[in-house]
Amino acid sequence: MKDLLQVHGLTRRFGGLTAVNDISFNVERGEIFGIIGPNGAGKTTLFNLIAGHFRPSAGAMSFDGQDISGQSSDEIARRGVARTFQAVHVFQEQTVGENLRRAGVLARYHSPFAYFSRRRKRSGSADSLEVARFIGLADLLDSTAGSLAYGLQKMLGIGMAMMASPTLLLMDEPAAGLNPSEKKAAGALIRKLRDERGITVLLVEHDMLLVMGTCDRILVINQGQSIALGTPAVVKSDAKVIEAYLGEDYEFA
């Protein structure tokens, strides 16, 4: 099956507000797929629907050929979906290695209660070293996460998501708060996840240089609705996208 994720007519209402309105798209295996749009467009709600944090008001989703509509985040994670967060989500007082190992145990049990009841300190240690090398933090395994620069903490967050060995990785604004060189490194890591690990990536992002230089296809949403879907070249020249989001004077270096 070519499509890994299929979304059909997805809708989410909060009282009288329709945050996501009849959105449909597919994400192919091995694809880097971006979702962009202005603030308040519904990107985060759509992201949370896919991750299972919200239940859809209407519509359906399938992952790897199986219906996941309305399943919980734990159930969706068990199928092979992991996520990163816009803000740094690491255990600040723990070392890089401890963060990765803890993430590995949490991924196996998909429950913090299961982790704290078992206290398996060395679980996943071999995998954690491999992941640390992959994200460029192998020399910092014994450093506390809180001592790392912000950009390295975000890399650690990606590594923690990798400990779940996901088929699909949902990335929420991976470039947020990064300087230009860190953004370039983040883009390279995203491509590396796909090219070397075979991980399909779906990302929500505001940095257009990263999006246009990394994604294979992009969905643009505005006011809860899809307004464009296509390759970066198609999307950045779409009149509706320029009007709603990019602006006439936007340039891609």
Image (cartoon, rainbow, N blue to C red):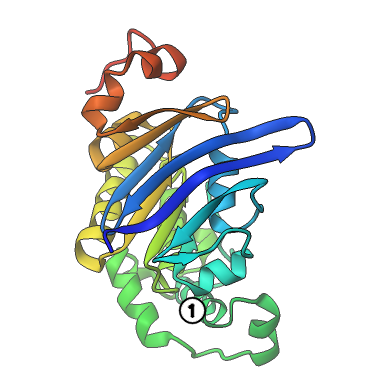
| Residue 148 appears in the rendering | no
Task: Pinpoint residue 99: horizontal percent, then vertical percent.
Answer: 51, 72
Question: Circle 1: is it few (<14), some (14-19), or many (20+) Cα within 10 Å?
Answer: many
Between 209 and 19, the residue placed more toward the observer is: 19
Q: Quadrant of residue 245?
A: top left
Q: Residue 211: where, in percent of width, then height?
A: 32, 36
Q: Residue at x 44, y 62 (%)?
A: 63
233 with respect to 67 (left or right): left
Q: Amino acid at mark 1?
A: Gly
Q: Which residue is mark 1?
A: 104
Q: Is residue 178 above or below residue 123?
A: above
Q: Is residue 209 above or below residue 112?
A: above
| Residue at 29 percent of width and 33 percent of height | 230
Tell me, yes or no, if residue 62 can be seen here.
Answer: yes
Residue that appears at 25% across and 65% down: 198
Question: With respect to residue 140, does 116 lie above or below?
Answer: below
Q: Secondary structure at mark 1?
A: helix
Residue 238 place in picture, x, y as percent: 31, 18
Based on the displayed image, in which of its 4 quarters is residue 65 positioned?
Answer: bottom left
Q: Residue at x 32, y 8 (%)?
A: 249
Above or below, 162 relative to 32? below
Dividing the image into 4 quarters, which one contains the N terminus?
A: bottom left
Asked where in the image residue 192 lies, by quadrant, the reply is bottom left
Q: Residue furthest right?
A: 15
Work out whether residue 154 or residue 204 is closer to the camera in this orientation and state it.
Answer: 204
